């Protein structure tokens, strides 16, 4: 297809990367990026790039990836609760300052022949181009202006979070809670330069209000940072900060917005990155999604005879991946929002297992292959055995299901619930037909459940329903003292094992 002009709205990572790829694929076209901000000013701190994202970027454009890697910092990952810490030796985790990433991508865009125009606020109505790529972020003006065509839906999470940073490099990425007089705050922090680390801190609404942050949020102008919250959190995380300050950059409390669009394109306009979709930060960055969108869009435009076919191919390739990521990101978001409820119930190594398996993306066996030492510690805690008694990853599912359980005066020879248990008079059978363990219907069911010695949860056999059932089982375990059983089809034995190790359920009933 012949393209003479391409306009990109938004000079973030996704827009810059898309502009470079499209210019390389269509050297005859005039490619222009319009960014309303200044090239030397940006908001945010570090951006993380996991190994799979690096592989995707390398396949699409190895030169720009080399530039990104050269300006990045690698780090390991750790989790700490009180004085108990586990470390995962992931040498392929990279982080880069957002401002540095933009500088790298600006350089490579210009090197390809892209024209960058800063301090220019444009809308699609202002542009006369063959192709318009709207990479104008989570608050996309393009998506808003053409809402009837893009059909956006926005779901807002219940928890609150803020982005800030500090002026030293943490020894590794760390997940760490801090309990104060008002409640628990959880930090997700990681180094991205020799003298900088990102701190993302979240909490629940009740804690946020008790600490008075509803008022400080209201009183903080949009262009400023909530210094009262920063001072409070600097004290709460003083041991992690090692005497360093928390630094703001338009830092204020927010609730995460998950964005869905019925269509990502209309006429000659296509959405990219946060403008089209978002996924919770705990499962992957918006930068990753936007840059991977750019790869798919460039590939589709290059292969198609017209824009309609290109846009259809773009969505056909990207929607399944984005839908999947949004699904597991939603589970991850809810896991973190309920993190304080579980942080005192398991040793930290087992809690790391619960974290890694929280969204159905990583199974225990896979995690045990990549981090055997931490996995063995967590599995030993689950099975109440020495770490030397934990088998190889290939044998873990059978081993997990075979562990005995002592629950009060009851003893079970394995984690497979006896069939007779289901029909005992003291067993309460519950049909959980929803995939969401945290929606209004789930809350109503949880509030209506009577006291019983055993709770046996059934429902649909598709994987999303089983994962939702396990999450509801965990809520039920924290509300009541009875033994909790979830029905799991035999083909999802690995998910059953994950639910057991993570203490989402006490027993499983395999079959169907």
Image (spheres, helix red, strand yellow):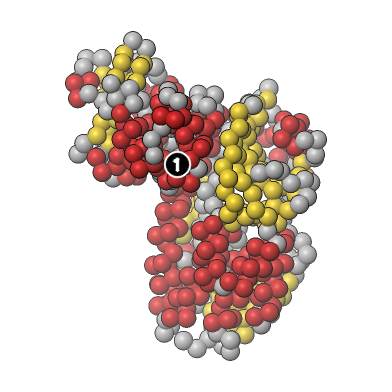
Task: Quadrant for the C terminus, please.
Answer: top left
Residue 112, quarter of the rendered image: bottom right
Vertical placement of 6 versus 331: above or below?
below
- Which quadrant of the view contains residue 417? top left
**Callout 1: helix, strand or loop?**
helix
Residue 143 on image: x %, y %:
54, 63
Q: Is residue 313 above or below residue 23?
A: above
Q: Nearer the viewer, residue 398 or 208?
A: 398
**Percent x, y of residue 127:** 61, 78
Residue under the image location 21 percent in, 17 percent down: 424
Residue 61 in sight: yes
Q: Is residue 339 left or right of residue 331?
A: right
| Residue at x-position 68% and y-position 55% | 73
Residue at the (69%, 71%) spot, across then down: 106
Classify residue 417 as left or right of residue 108.
left
Q: Residue 16, how many percent across, how many down?
A: 63, 70
Within 10 Å of disc 1 (Cα), the crowding (few <14, some 14-19, many 20+) is many
Q: What is the count of numbered marks?
A: 1
Q: Which residue is mark 1?
A: 368
């Amino acid at each position: 297809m012949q393209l003479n002009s391409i306009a990109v709205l938004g000079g973030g990572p996704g827009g810059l990367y898309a502009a470079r790829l499209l210019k390389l694929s269509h050297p005859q076209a005039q490619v222009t990026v319009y960014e309303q901000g200044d090239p030397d000013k940006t908001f945010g701190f570090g951006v993380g790039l996991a190994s799979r994202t690096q592989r995707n970027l390398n396949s699409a454009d190895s030169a720009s990836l080399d530039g990104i890697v050269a300006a990045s910092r690698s780090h390991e990952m750790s989790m700490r609760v009180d004085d108990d810490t586990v470390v995962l030796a992931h040498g392929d985790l990279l982080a880069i300052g957002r401002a540095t990433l933009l500088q790298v991508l600006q350089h490579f865009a210009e090197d390809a022949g892209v024209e960058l125009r800063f301090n220019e606020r444009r809308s699609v109505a202002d542009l006369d181009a063959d192709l318009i790529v709207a990479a104008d972020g989570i608050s996309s003006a393009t998506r808003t202006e053409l809402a009837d065509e893009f059909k956006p839906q926005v779901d807002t999470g219940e928890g609150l979070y803020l982005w800030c940073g500090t002026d030293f490099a943490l020894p590794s990425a760390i997940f760490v809670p801090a309990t104060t007089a008002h409640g628990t705050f959880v930090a997700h922090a990681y180094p991205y330069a020799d003298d900088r680390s990102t701190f993302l801190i979240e909490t629940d609404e009740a804690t946020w209000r008790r600490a008075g942050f509803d008022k400080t949020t209201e009183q903080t102008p949009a262009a400023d940072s909530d210094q009262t919250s920063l001072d409070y959190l600097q004290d709460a995380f003083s041991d992690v900060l090692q005497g360093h300050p928390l630094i703001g950059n338009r830092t204020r409390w927010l609730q995460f917005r998950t964005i869905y669009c019925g269509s990502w394109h209309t006429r000659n306009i296509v959405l990219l990155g946060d403008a089209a979709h978002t996924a919770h930060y705990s499962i992957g960055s918006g930068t990753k999604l936007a840059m991977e969108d750019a790869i798919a869009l460039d590939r589709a435009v290059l292969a198609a005879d017209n824009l309609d076919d290109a846009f259809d191919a773009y969505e056909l390739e990207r929607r399944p991946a984005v839908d999947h990521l949004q699904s597991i990101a939603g589970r991850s978001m809810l896991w973190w929002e309920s993190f304080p409820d579980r942080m005192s119930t398991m040793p930290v190594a087992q809690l790391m297992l619960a974290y890694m398996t929280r969204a159905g993306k990583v199974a225990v066996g896979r995690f045990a292959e990549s981090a055997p030492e931490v996995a063995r510690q967590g599995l030993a805690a689950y099975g109440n055995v020495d770490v030397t008694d934990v088998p190889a990853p290939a044998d873990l599912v059978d081993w997990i299901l075979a562990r005995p359980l002592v629950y009060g005066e009851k003893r079970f020879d394995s984690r497979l619930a006896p069939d007779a248990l289901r029909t005992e008079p003291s067993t309460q059978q519950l049909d959980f037909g929803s995939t969401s363990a945290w929606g209004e219907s789930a809350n109503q069911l949880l509030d209506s459940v009577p006291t019983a010695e055993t709770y046996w949860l059934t429902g649909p056999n598709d994987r999303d329903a089983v994962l939702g059932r396990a999450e509801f089982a965990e809520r039920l375990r924290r509300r009541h003292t009875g033994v909790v059983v979830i029905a799991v089809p035999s083909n999802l034995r690995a998910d059953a094992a994950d639910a057991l190790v993570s203490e989402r359920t006490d027993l499983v009933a395999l079959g169907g």
